[in-house]
Amino acid sequence: MWWYVGKKTVIFDLDETLIHCNDTLTPPFDVKLPITFPTGEVIEAGINIRPHAQEILKNLSRYFEIIVFTASHSCYANVVLDYLDPTGEFIHHRLFREHCYQTPEGMYCKDLRVLDRDMTEMVLVDNAAYSYAAQPDNGIPILPYYHGKADFELKALERYLQQMVLAKDVRTVNRKTFQLHNYRNYYGEPERLVEELYIREEN
């Protein structure tokens, strides 16, 4: 465990955060990867890599422990992660669907208590807000990615994460920035949420 001693932890979702897996092999896609199912069946998956994904993993790994926590099955996710980080140098640990908590509605939530880490030193970057429902102040929302070379979300994320390196409690930074704890007060009223929590504050 030498790689994360004294470092905070950044946890990435996989699908629609770092990459997008197409439903078919119809372009656009960046790479075709062979996926072997437990049954032995092999299919080719067309994968779009989010711009700057490999760059941000490399850059952040110098300052953070990097974990990928996905609701996907390991037989698929490991192939994609081996492509993103072929030497295993940047992604230090991987968690899969079996590590998630499945709600009665069928959603897979990522309870960070499965990791033996201090909650003050972990953030989860995920395009699905329900993923970090158990610890909303540890969550960093990101727009979902499907395809396109102009996407700059990960570059903006890297700048945001720089302030976490010296933060005493990452949840304090997130709570002030995203105010996710207030969202329950605006159920069904997204326009009022944006107006009162963000636009008015900027003005």
Image (tube, rainbow, N blue to C red):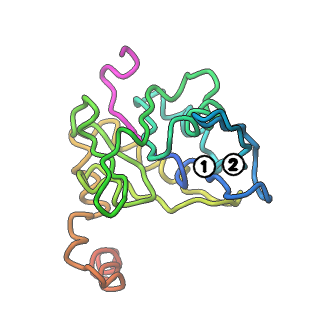
Which one is earlier in the sequence, the residue at label 2 or at label 1?
Answer: 1
- The magenta segment is 1-11
**Does the magenta portion include 7?**
yes
Position of residue 189 in the picture relative to residue 151 (left or right):
left
SS class, disc 1: strand
For this rendering, which residue is in front, 136 or 82? 82
As displayed, is residue 91 above or below residue 179? above
Q: Residue furthest top?
A: 2
Q: Position of residue 79 (x, y in %)?
A: 62, 34
Q: Position of residue 64 (x, y in %)?
A: 40, 31
Q: Which mark is residue 47?
A: 2
Residue 68 position (above or below residue 106): above
- Which quarter of the picture shows residue 8? top left
Residue type, label 2: Ile
Describe residue 159's horizontal placement relative to residue 34 as left or right: left
Instruction: Give residue 16's quadrant in the image.
Output: bottom right
Along the viewing direction, whichever of 46 and 159 lies nearer the viewer: 46
Query: Which residue lies under the disc numbered 1?
Result: 19
Other-residue count near label 2 (Cα within 10 Å), few / some / many at <14 / 14–19 / ≥20:
many
Task: Give residue 38's mark.
Answer: none
Residue in view at x 68 percent, y 38 percent: 41
Q: Residue at x 68, y 51 (%)?
A: 48
Q: Quadrant of the N terminus?
A: top left
Q: Secondary structure at mark 2?
A: strand
Q: Position of residue 57 (x, y in %)?
A: 54, 36
Question: Alpha-carbon distance for marks 2 and 1?
Answer: 7 Å
Instruction: Decide: is 168 above or below 155.
Output: above
The C terminus: image quadrant: bottom left
Identified by mark 1, the residue type is Ile
User: Mark 2 near mark 1, Cβ–Cβ under 8 Å?
Assistant: yes
